[in-house]
Image (cartoon, rainbow, N blue to C red):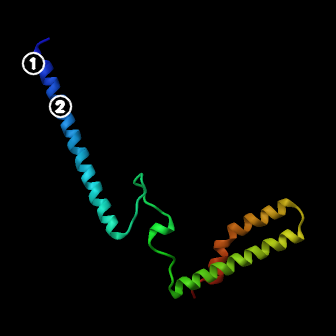
């Protein structure tokens, strides 16, 4: 085997390794820029680089406007109605099948009831 073939193969491997290293460096630089941009916006990451979703590091609470308050109140009212309906079924019918059916039905009917009760005119 001629020595020039091995030298060319080694040079090709070194060229590929250098290209891979340059690509890794470019990706790391892009990630650092992205992280710096998100850090400016207040987005936090944990040790593994995953976005933190905990309320303490999110930096924003729930919405406080009049529309948000109205929607929260409507949702609370709907949940209260569904809980009352399930309690009535629980007290009236002793069978577990009826209780389970009422629970599943209330979960499935909740979006429809919300739309019917609180639809914009």
- Tag of residue 14: 2
68 vs 90, left or right, is: left
Q: Quadrant of the N terminus?
A: top left
The residue lying at 50 percent from left, 86 percent from top is 65
Q: Residues within 10 Å of mark 2 (few under 14, many from 20)?
A: few
Query: Is 12 rendered above or below residue 116?
Result: above
**Earlier-in-chain disc, 1 versus 2:** 1
Tell me which residue sits at (13%, 19%) in the image: 5
* Residue neighbourhood size for the residue with mark 1, other residues' Cα within 10 Å, grouped as few (<14), some (14–19), many (≥20): few
Determine whether 22 is above or below 40 in the image.
above
**Residue 24, image x and y in percent?**
26, 45
Residue 41 rendering spot, x and y as whole percentages: 34, 70
Do the numbered discs 1 and 2 sit on residues whose CB atoms are within 8 Å? Answer: no
Q: In the rendered view, would you say 37 is above or below 118? A: above
**Residue 41 vertical position relative to residue 49 in the rendered view, above or below:** below
For residue 88, the mark is: none
Answer with the quarter of the image where residue 103 lies.
bottom right
Of the pair 15 and 81, the residue shown nearer to us? 15
Residue with the mark numbered 1: 4
Query: Does residue 29 appear left or right of residue 84 in this picture?
Result: left
Q: Which quarter of the rendering shows the C terminus?
A: bottom right
Q: Residue 16 at x, y = what percent?
A: 20, 34
Tag 2 secondary structure: helix
Q: Nearer the viewer, residue 52 or 110?
A: 52
Marks 1/2: CA–CA distance: 15 Å
């Amino acid at each position: 085997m001629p020595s020039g073939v091995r030298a060319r193969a080694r040079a090709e491997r070194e060229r590929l390794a250098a290209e891979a290293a340059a690509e890794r460096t470019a990706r790391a630089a892009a990630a650092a820029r992205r992280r710096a941009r998100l850090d400016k916006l207040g987005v936090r990451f944990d040790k593994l680089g995953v976005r933190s979703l905990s309320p303490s590091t999110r930096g924003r609470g729930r919405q406080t406007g009049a529309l948000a308050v109205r929607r929260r109140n409507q949702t609370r009212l709907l949940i209260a109605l569904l809980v009352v309906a399930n309690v009535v079924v629980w007290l009236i019918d002793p069978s577990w099948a009826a209780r389970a059916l009422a629970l599943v039905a209330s979960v499935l009917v909740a979006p429809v009831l919300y739309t019917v009760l609180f639809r914009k005119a």
